[in-house]
Amino acid sequence: MARVTDQDIDPAMMRKQYRSEIVHQETLAGSPMDQFALWFQQAADSHLFEPNAMIVSTATADGRPSSRTVLMKQFDGRGFVFFTNYASRKGREIAENPYVSLLFPWHPISRQVVVTGTATRIGRDETAAYFRSRPHGSQLGAWASEQSSVIGSRAELDRRYAELAARYPEGEQVPVPPEWGGMRVVPDAVEFWQGHENRLHDRLRYVLDADEWRVERLCP
């Protein structure tokens, strides 16, 4: 096999010792969303780049998975919300199979949060309220991009955007695209992962059981 670069890079030799405090089960919040709020604030206070960035994994009806990075825009006791074109690949897969996984990869602070649950569309009023809060250019971009569809060239995408910018100049209200909106992931399990030296990581998972959350510790 041809070498990819002029200098060999061996990923097997890449390793880092994680050094952090032990996470004790009795110190966790009563619900995963309260615990997430605490860790999310700490991630933001650590000045991580886009701590709301998460990997969203979906699958087709026959189980073929796909993943991508998406920005989480809302969270509360009901779950985690992101926005997308419903005709995109993830939108189509969620329509076929609502079970999804979210991963918040906070590598600089040796933490990650893994969520599994079910995705459902949020109400159009909620979608419209968020859409209005977006920068004008991002509103136009939601119209210009038929997300996940094949396009002939970058020039074609730029042309679409320019036409929309002429139709809806800065200061003029842009309508919400009919195929664009929010997805709420309602969790049934949330795992909080804290890295430790010798790969003896903490993995504490909230699991929904008969409408109540119980916590279990997993081997790393």
Image (spheres, rainbow, N blue to C red):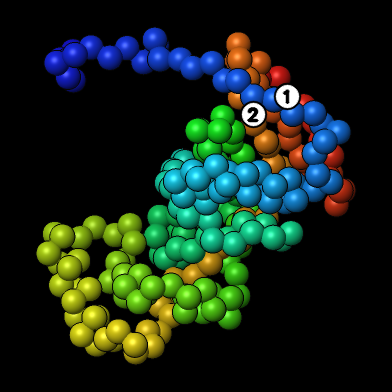
* Above or below, 180 relative to 184: below
At 67% from the left and 57% from the top, the residue drawn is 79
Other-residue count near label 2 (Cα within 10 Å), few / some / many at <14 / 14–19 / ≥20? many
Residue pointed to by mark 1: 22
At 14% from the left and 59% from the top, the residue drawn is 153
Residue pointed to by mark 2: 194
Other-residue count near label 1 (Cα within 10 Å), few / some / many at <14 / 14–19 / ≥20? few
Q: Secondary structure at mark 1?
A: loop
Asked which quadrant contains residue 185, the reply is: bottom right
Residue 115 located left or right of residue 24: left
How far from the left and from the top, in percent, is residue 119? Answer: 60, 57
Q: How many marks?
A: 2
Q: Look at the numbered discs 2 and 1 and tell me whether their residues touch, using CB distance below 8 Å.
A: yes
**Amino acid type, label 1:** Ile
Residue 175 located left or right of residue 36: left
**Amino acid type, label 2:** Gln
* Above or below, 97 relative to 207: below
Question: Which badge, 2 or 1, comes first in the chain's sequence?
Answer: 1
At 69% from the left and 60% from the top, the residue drawn is 76
* Disc 2 to disc 1, C-alpha distance: 8 Å
How far from the left and from the top, in percent, is residue 145? Answer: 29, 67
